[in-house]
Amino acid sequence: MNSKRLEKTYIAVAQNASGRNLNVPIYRISDGLPGPKVYIQSSIHGAEVQGNVVIYHLLNALKHTHIAGEIVLVPNCNPVGTNIKAGEYTLGRFDPVNGTNWNRGYFYDEAKVDAFAADLPDEKITRALAAANKIELTSLKDEIKTQFRQQWKKAIENKLDEPWGLGLAQQLNLTLQKLAFDADLVLDLHNGPVSTRHIYIPEYAKTTATEFSIPHCIFIPKVFAGALDEACFCPWWTLQDALKRRYQHHFDFGVQAFTLEMGSQEVIDFNEGAKDAEGILGFLAKRGVLLNSQYKPAKMKRVGVNLTDYKTLFTDFGGMVEYCKKPGDLVKKGEVLAKVLNIDDLDNDNAIHHINAPCDLIPMLHFPSASVLSGTQLYKCFTNYFEL
Amino acid sequence: MNSKRLEKTYIAVAQNASGRNLNVPIYRISDGLPGPKVYIQSSIHGAEVQGNVVIYHLLNALKHTHIAGEIVLVPNCNPVGTNIKAGEYTLGRFDPVNGTNWNRGYFYDEAKVDAFAADLPDEKITRALAAANKIELTSLKDEIKTQFRQQWKKAIENKLDEPWGLGLAQQLNLTLQKLAFDADLVLDLHNGPVSTRHIYIPEYAKTTATEFSIPHCIFIPKVFAGALDEACFCPWWTLQDALKRRYQHHFDFGVQAFTLEMGSQEVIDFNEGAKDAEGILGFLAKRGVLLNSQYKPAKMKRVGVNLTDYKTLFTDFGGMVEYCKKPGDLVKKGEVLAKVLNIDDLDNDNAIHHINAPCDLIPMLHFPSASVLSGTQLYKCFTNYFEL
Amino acid sequence: MNSKRLEKTYIAVAQNASGRNLNVPIYRISDGLPGPKVYIQSSIHGAEVQGNVVIYHLLNALKHTHIAGEIVLVPNCNPVGTNIKAGEYTLGRFDPVNGTNWNRGYFYDEAKVDAFAADLPDEKITRALAAANKIELTSLKDEIKTQFRQQWKKAIENKLDEPWGLGLAQQLNLTLQKLAFDADLVLDLHNGPVSTRHIYIPEYAKTTATEFSIPHCIFIPKVFAGALDEACFCPWWTLQDALKRRYQHHFDFGVQAFTLEMGSQEVIDFNEGAKDAEGILGFLAKRGVLLNSQYKPAKMKRVGVNLTDYKTLFTDFGGMVEYCKKPGDLVKKGEVLAKVLNIDDLDNDNAIHHINAPCDLIPMLHFPSASVLSGTQLYKCFTNYFEL
Amino acid sequence: MNSKRLEKTYIAVAQNASGRNLNVPIYRISDGLPGPKVYIQSSIHGAEVQGNVVIYHLLNALKHTHIAGEIVLVPNCNPVGTNIKAGEYTLGRFDPVNGTNWNRGYFYDEAKVDAFAADLPDEKITRALAAANKIELTSLKDEIKTQFRQQWKKAIENKLDEPWGLGLAQQLNLTLQKLAFDADLVLDLHNGPVSTRHIYIPEYAKTTATEFSIPHCIFIPKVFAGALDEACFCPWWTLQDALKRRYQHHFDFGVQAFTLEMGSQEVIDFNEGAKDAEGILGFLAKRGVLLNSQYKPAKMKRVGVNLTDYKTLFTDFGGMVEYCKKPGDLVKKGEVLAKVLNIDDLDNDNAIHHINAPCDLIPMLHFPSASVLSGTQLYKCFTNYFEL
């Protein structure tokens, strides 16, 4: 494996109030062989740190694995969010200045996809499709893919060059998106508050669920809601749709993107991280990125849910909460999810208020503090879930 | 004025982590005479407190003024946001738990407007319009208005009764919106960071600009972007549009809503507040809410701008900033807006970096701290502004 | 038990920025029988909430137990600290405005003890001691105790009436201290960050360790460092000392105070709370506060440490930490306490830095976040500990 | 002036959670001539940024001024505090993790001074004093000074090398103190919340007041309360005292330290900074650090106060406050200092509560937010002040 290339570079994604650059490390690893490009980032939310351990284990494993293509690993990709402490915890989910979620400022513009599709050399494509042979079509697809990638990255750059400037979260997001948009496979590593492992998968790629080693799968529509995974797959999906409508031919550009939730925030665990990494390596092997490797997706029970059935249970009271069910538990309708202590009624029957499961469900995560105001996200739950 | 009625009630808008209700005071004042209903709230953003002083002065003046209709005053309408301290300042713009802007969770659903319009007794309306006389039309309009109001408030209630619950900001917003939706005139009192007085006015009500006594006017499109003013006027506007398309008749329901920016956050000033209140009283007099009063809009120079020309200047660096122009200043292209000190270059020519105005502009507000990260909103500015 | 009296009252300990009182509930329970007075408070640090559950269980048990004396229970005694959220967690340890620890503003003034001792009717006491019989001495002691209590509470009131006012933490602390200073036994219920159960016991009351059911005991010198337990026992101890020096007689006023650390912050657990309460009931039974009850201190292995051997391990680096040892673990010198991930060296041998135990130790608690700056309290540990 | 030496170096004072060093720039400037050593730092409290501008102007001026001795300038000396944002403001006064004031962790140990004094070669000193001539005494004093400086810096290093580590604020403070302890003149540049310029001067150096160009002077006792100025002058003062007691000779080591409050936090102003710098240059000229310069202390009215008469006015209520007096105003007993708006009583006579000056006073600073809880530091005031 003497052609193994491991390169480390840095990009400045922001400047702090001292005027110093905040750098993000980028590790690129390949064996110089053709194949898909993979992009994996972690910790866009500053307190969600387990992905950094996963990337550490990935790097270690990849040093000893044949790679077809290239894998780009970007740990700790939000050095601002990582470093805002508020008490002992990390205020990592949103910009402390203005509340902007660090994972909602990526670029997407459906009109730009349509314009690109409209600008394609119609006659040439029609001719190629008519005289279709596999090689010609592949080359046509590759050509379109390359052009689209270039134009989209150019659009991101234009956005970044906005003469009046951009907000910090958006600057950060776009800088990362430019890197990610080169990839065919994008994995964004997150954590929940107190959480079990789960994954967001685009509906149209439902079968991918079995290629990961994660027991809980949420299927999301191909709608852009601001996150990196959507920002990576929506443009391609929309382009495929436009081409299908026009040419009745399905161009599959093979670009997919996923958000993986690797357990709870504020915690790293090296042993768990080794397993998390193995799961990702199984996926990469399945996709032909790893050659002759022993990695493969785990055999396991998998449960799926459609996004509309992934429900958030909010409180309509304030108080002190015991979370009676753990993330991943199978909960029957009517079972006690939480007990709330009422400080002003410790001497009577209102001391404890029970919150029951409104239906059969599996909690994926719960709020990480016993102290809640009304309107707090107590649990996020799978309902109407199904086995895969 | 022996029929003057001043009523004070409270509504609980949230519970804190001690399980106690957080109450908002509601002052209602009228003389029992018919007329428009007015709703005025302040401090939905917790650090924007000058509106509370304005309401104090309004109440004092209204005690001695004949009112046609009713005026509902809701000061300090966000007791959560008011009470989150982070250092000496108030973290009042967003929910400290999740970053949600306290002014973006109001209800709007265009489909519900269309459904309402479609359900109207078509034949009856057509007939009334055909045989139109002023009294009949007014009564028809009033009937539609009453029904629409009821349905919309019912929709808000349904939303609040969501079986899985709602987030805190949304609960708060909807509870207030239910009150505001009864009104014909809605004023939402805000402040900017370091700011001069300005007002947001719907484009379609541009002439209203001269009814207020505020020198800087931003004209916004009739698009719902989440704020209270939009949540109050968009449904009516959309309904008017639908009815116009169907019956070629312009029903003017007379509902308008405005966001007033009363100077800088974190500051109250009783003298300024008296002037602010006088301006609002002038508007109310102009609209027939105050009878035989001496109040009227001030004669003043007014400058307007379209929302697309209301520009935010972001930094692309971090450092320490002197804001060289004050909100309200007329700034020429190329003039120095800000000087940035670079701590690491105090000994050379890079010590100070100048930021120049990219075009002629009037800053409305600037960031309230010298210390900025890259991507900070330095100034918000009128560009391409015009005299009214 | 028809004389059981359970009374609930409220005291306002602060006002928030809305100008509303923040109330603390006070539950008093007795059977109208003579006996010691007990004061138990919880949550002076806002995120340390398990004590509230303990008080709930105590109240429930005490309803069915004969009480000699009176027990005053003050849950959630810091409604300011309880309600400052910063992200999902509670910023409960210090005043968010100025950083003041909520548990360091109690009153103590050694000079006042000395002055009180000097003012005692010397001749009368000397005579009583000379002609000493048990009844006379007890009555003398009770007289001194009552007078001292009155004077000390008066001193606290004077402090609270300071003409230029007092800081919030101090106002809160003094208001609670006035209640606590009436008691003979004071328990202050706390939590650590991620923590096992432990207790602070004054050195001079070392034997008390076996009266609680808590396995880890820290023995503190009789020095006032600002906390409630010290503020409650130091004045009496100092007074006893002064009287001993003067009269060669040991007056034991029987006042003791303890800080109990009931596990981890940000968590409540009703089952654990029941056990915590049982331990406290065992202590109260032992002290004669509970009559004919089945409660008694648990038989268990107990480990003690002197405060000087209770060590804090600080980091001298920043990074992401896995805490390899759990609070309560027996750790040998050289064992790995923590692994630190270095984001910039994931590709080389510096990726993981090990922190080893500098000596045999038992961690009591560790930091609750993986993300640490240099100078972070990683662990607090028993060293040179001994079995009791 | 061809021997002008301007050197810039960096020291790492902390690591952030990304594991990166946080560096502080150190500018040293001299002409290679003998003379006093001066140390000036700014922004130990992160939001107090005007001192950085002052240092910028100092550097510019010093490039063109003959210097006897050396001047060390350390701007932005707390890169952690500078970079914690909480909303738009900087949470710069205390460590956001634990509330520790960034300006209270310096080293002082009176016992170490006494031990040093006791270890001096008694006979040699007695002999030198007996046979005293000016040169011999100066050389003796210099010898003692050098030795003491070395020992003290060694003690600081030992503290920093503490095997169990140190908290972040203390690490930062000690690292800076090691630099400052080399100096004969130490200036620590701060700001108040909303503040006028004032200075802290040790009582024993009262006459220094006229060497600065700052109108308000607070005289502090020679007691160590944790701040840098005290940490710099207390050891020398205590040493002088010890030597005086032993040898009846006053050794004046000529070390002095001052805290300068350069107006309001969160603001920089280049014009004001130029004046601030000129005042400091006047002081340095007066002290012989600047040669043949035109700088001299301003002729101005100066007002002084003893620390015990520098009073903090706390609120005993919560609400919204208008600060009616500006820092620097002469206020007569009974004049209105503040008006407090009571949201729940806008309709009656309790709407506004007045806070009157309890005596004649000059406010130095007031709280920077209208929204206050009970127990807030409303104003800090000179009382019983006197003209200098």
Image (cartoon, coloured by chain):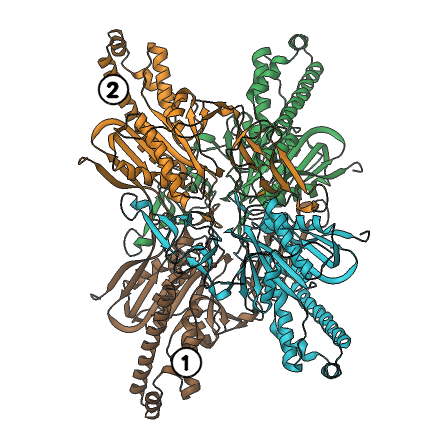
Chain colours: A orange, B green, C cyan, D brown
Q: Residue at x 66, y 21 (%)?
A: B145
Q: Which of marks 1 and 2 is in front?
A: 2
Q: Which residue is drawn at 40% across and 25% down?
A: A209
Q: In this view, does A233 lie above or below D44?
A: above
Q: Mark 2, chain letter?
A: A
Q: How far apart are marks 1 and 2 (CA)?
A: 84 Å
Count of numbered tags: 2
Residue tagged 1: D240
* Depth check, front residue: C331 or D202: C331
Q: How crowded is mark 2: few (under 14 residues within 10 Å), some or many (20 or more)?
A: few
Left or right: B22, with D148 as reference point: right
The circle on residue C341 is none
Residues marked 1 and 2 touching at CB (< 8 Å): no
Element class at badge 1: helix
The circle on residue A143 is 2
Q: Kindly identify the amino acid type of the residue bearing the numbered disc 1.
A: Gln
Element class at badge 2: helix
Looking at the image, can residue B43 be seen? Answer: no
